Amino acid sequence: MLVLKVSNNCGDFGAMQFEEAHGGKLAGEIIADMLADSDAHESDDWQLSLHEFKDIDPAFVKFVKERIMDYDDSKNTNFYLETEKIGG
């Protein structure tokens, strides 16, 4: 499964700005665009990277995002499974 990591390019709130720009889209759509053209969603506000893992339990990801991740930190760095909606 592919995971899209969003972080600051420079300054603060890169992940939050990415979410405002792409909210509601499936992360898989952004990933497909990036695989076709690595500069597809480039910005001065955020940096995107792809990571591949064999198996990821969506329930575990939900647990991490709701119970472990710090809300303020998630404005700077966040991640989305390819099956997740951005901002969902």
Image: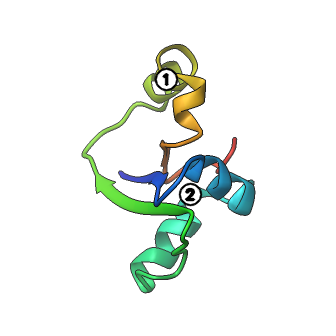
Tell me the SS state at disc 2.
helix
Q: Which residue is mark 1?
A: 69
**Is residue 32 among what the camera can see?**
yes
- The location of residue 57, given as percent across then percent down, is 40, 30
> Residue at image x 56%, y 47%?
12
> Residue at image x 43%, y 23%?
60
Q: Amino acid at mark 1?
A: Met
- Which residue is more in the foreground, 45 or 5? 45
**In this rendering, is residue 63 above or below 45?**
above
**Label 2 crowding class (10 Å Cα cut-off): few <14, some 14-19, many 20+?**
many
Q: In which quadrant is the C terminus drawn?
A: top right
Q: Amino acid at mark 2?
A: Ala
Q: Which residue is mark 2?
A: 27
Dot in front, 1 or 2: 1
- The location of residue 35, given as percent across then percent down, is 40, 77
- The location of residue 43, given as percent across then percent down, is 55, 72
